Amino acid sequence: MRRLTIGAGVLLLCGPYVRSAEKVFDFSELKTGEAPAGFRSVVSGDGKPGQWKVVQNELPQAFPSISGKAPVQTERAVLAQVSRDPTDEHAPILIYEGETFGDFKITTLFKLVDGDVEQMAGIAFRIQDENNFYYVRASGIGNSFYFFKIVNGQRSAPIGAKAEIPRGVWHEMAVECKGTEIRAWLNGKELVATLSDKSFASGRIGFWTKSDSVSYFADTRVIYTPRETLAQILIKESLRTHPRLIGLQMFAPMGGSKEAHLVASSNATEIGRPAPPEVQDVLARSIPYHGKDRDHVIITLPLRDRNGENVAAVKVIMKSFPGQTDKNALARALPIVKAMEERVQTRKDLLE
């Protein structure tokens, strides 16, 4: 396996035959006060969505100093939820939109910073929507580490154990899903006994808080079994059918976001990047874009679903030849996208 950068703050471990991949959420490239791109802020229950942003905070060194003279803590960028809405049934969630996970293990550091009504931090996973998901959370006031299931907005009974979780200290939380089995750890101790649940086979992951909790998250890693989306399957099949293509990319909005990102590509290292302005224009106005770069020509076309709705944009990169015109370049690219459209029912089908 090998590690490749696919976008700001996210790394991917991939290769032609790998069985596992890793994403690392690193917020160090973002400015203080910014909300991270590629995430969607929602609320489960009552009240308004939370306020998520990057802040600077001291974190333990990942590795001890050989000399012993280096500081044991260093200031780095971390993710913070800082809204103080005291509504009881109010759970802000920041959902990562770049991937749907089936089998995975997520590990994150978290710190309970403040809160009068609650001091909680957690991981939401296999998220279908705001009313259907699992989550594991740590409570500093309740001194507990529990698993819950939300189905149609109704919360299950807690499963877990009592535990001291001091405020203002970094702790580690981990969740693992394999098929129907779910396990969870707090600071290396498995406080949620292995349980089995068939409600949700896959879904998105997100950071979770409760009520007026101010909570920080850092050093989040997800090791998972990649799920090949229809978008990526269409790219691979098109490349097999047209082996002389230089490259092929598909862009689409993810989740509730209006901003498009690269969701499938002949080069896996690019996936996750924001769409350039010309691609955004193709999506907005449903018109083709023509471009040239040295010895190749670029045609970007809208991709429509069964109802004729523009759901994605496909960039076709082809080798140029003497006498190449925009018209014949479009004629070469159009059948490739039309063949894809025959397989696309909705945008959701492309991404899941």
Image (spheres, rainbow, N blue to C red):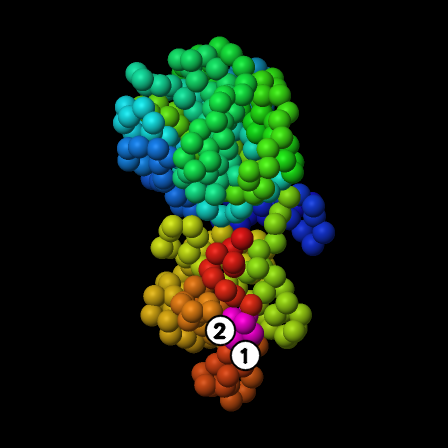
Quick check: can you spot residue 267? yes
Residue at 56 percent across and 33 percent down: it is 106
Residue 102 horizontal/vertical position (percent)? 60, 42
Determine which of the numbered discs, if any, sits on residue 309 in the image: none
Quick check: can you spot residue 50? no
What's the residue type where badge 1 is placed?
Answer: Pro
Label 2 to label 1: alpha-carbon separation: 15 Å
Between disc 2 and disc 1, whose residue precedes?
Answer: 2
Quadrant of the snapshot with the N terminus: top right
Residue at 56 percent across and 84 percent down: it is 321
Residue at 44 percent across and 28 percent down: it is 155
Residue at 58 percent across and 25 percent down: it is 184
Determine which of the numbered discs, if any, sits on residue 298 in the image: 2
**Position of residue 87 in the picture relative to residue 229 (left or right):** left
Q: Between 62 and 188, which is closer to the camera in this rendering? A: 188
Main secondary structure type of the part rendered in magenta:
helix
Residue farthest toward the right in the current orientation of the protein: 17
**Helix, strand or loop at mark 1:** helix
Residue position marked by numbered label 1 in the rendering: 335
Answer whether labels 2 and 1 touch (C-beta < 8 Å): no
Q: Is residue 339 magenta?
A: yes
Total labels: the figure holds 2
**Position of residue 16 in the picture relative to residue 22 (left or right):** right
**Which segment is the magenta one?**
338-342
Q: Residues within 10 Å of mark 1 (few under 14, many from 20)?
A: few
What's the residue type where badge 2 is placed?
Answer: Ile
Q: Between 216 and 165, which is closer to the camera in this rendering? A: 165
**Position of residue 122 in the picture relative to residue 66 (left or right):** left
Instruction: Please tell me in which quadrant of the rendered image residue 268 appears.
Output: bottom right
Q: Is residue 141 magenta?
A: no
**Helix, strand or loop at mark 2:** strand
Residue 187 horizontal/vertical position (percent)? 56, 18
